Image (cartoon, rainbow, N blue to C red):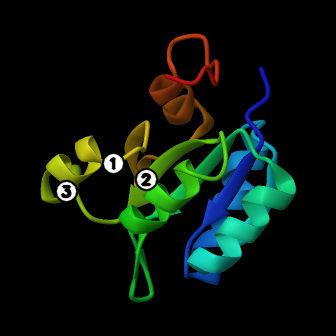
């Protein structure tokens, strides 16, 4: 199953590190975006299977972006952050995101776990 990924974060250093890590794990990163508007344009253009969205995009809300993306693309949205899930658990649960990953736990295996045991990108 394909796990073509779009990374959305306002840190170029994180984008570079995450891209290297995921591609080494066999997850093709088809693009990156550093803002909400760029993410929406890239998602529409690239049609990724998964969009990893940082909760804090330099003043923009990753939660708001997840809502906007879910209305425009069929990609699975996974929220990411350096903050603990405990800080945002209710907001994550109320969002259209499939799940949440702490940035330090980012891996192909962690993504597959959120998608389900088989890694399928089936829509709910």
- The answer to whether the residue labelled 1 contacts the one labelled 3, judged by CB atoms less than 8 Å apart, is no
Disc 2 crowd, CA 10 A, few/some/many (<14, 14-19, 20+): many
Residue 1 position (above or below residue 23): above
Measured from the top left, where is residue 80 in percent x and y?
A: 43, 57
Question: Which callout, 1 or 2, points to the residue nearer the camera?
Answer: 1
- Could you say which is closer to the camera, residue 89 or residue 16? 89
Q: Which residue is mark 3?
A: 88
Q: Measure the alpha-carbon separation of dots 1 and 2.
A: 9 Å
Quarter of the figure that contains the N terminus: top right
Residue under pointer 1? 95
Q: Is residue 101 above or below residue 103?
A: above
Dots 3 and 2: beta carbons under 8 Å? yes
**Mark 2 lies on residue:** 79
Tag 2 secondary structure: strand
Seen at 50% across and 17% down, the residue is 116
Q: Position of residue 123 (x, y in %)?
A: 57, 24
Residue at point 52%, 25% (across, down): 115
- Does residue 91 appear to the left or right of 108 in the view shown? left
Q: Position of residue 39 (x, y in %)?
A: 66, 69
- Closer to the chain start, of discs 1 and 3, is 3
Q: Is 117 displayed left or right of 20 in the figure?
A: left
Instruction: Quote the CA–CA distance across marks 1 and 3.
Output: 11 Å
At mark 1, the secondary structure is loop
Q: N-terminal of the two: label 3 or label 2?
A: 2
Residue at left offset 52%, top offset 12%: 117
Task: Indicate the quadrant where residue 46 lies.
Answer: bottom right
Q: Whole-Å distance between the Cαs marked 3 and 2?
A: 10 Å
Q: Given contact means CB atoms under 8 Å apart, are the residues at marks 1 and 2 in contact?
A: yes
């Amino acid at each position: 199953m394909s796990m073509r990924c779009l990374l959305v974060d306002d840190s170029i250093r994180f984008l570079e590190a995450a891209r290297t890590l995921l591609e080494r794990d066999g997850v093709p990163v088809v693009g990156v975006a550093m803002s909400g508007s760029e993410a929406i344009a890239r998602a529409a253009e690239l049609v990724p299977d998964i969009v990893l969205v940082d909760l804090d995009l330099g003043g923009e809300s990753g939660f708001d972006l997840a809502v906007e993306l879910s209305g425009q693309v069929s990609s699975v949205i996974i929220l990411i952050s350096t903050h603990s899930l405990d800080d945002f658990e209710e907001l994550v649960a109320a969002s259209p995101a499939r799940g949440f990953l702490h940035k330090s736990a980012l891996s192909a295996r962690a993504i597959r776990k959120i998608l389900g045991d088989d890694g399928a990108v089936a829509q709910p």
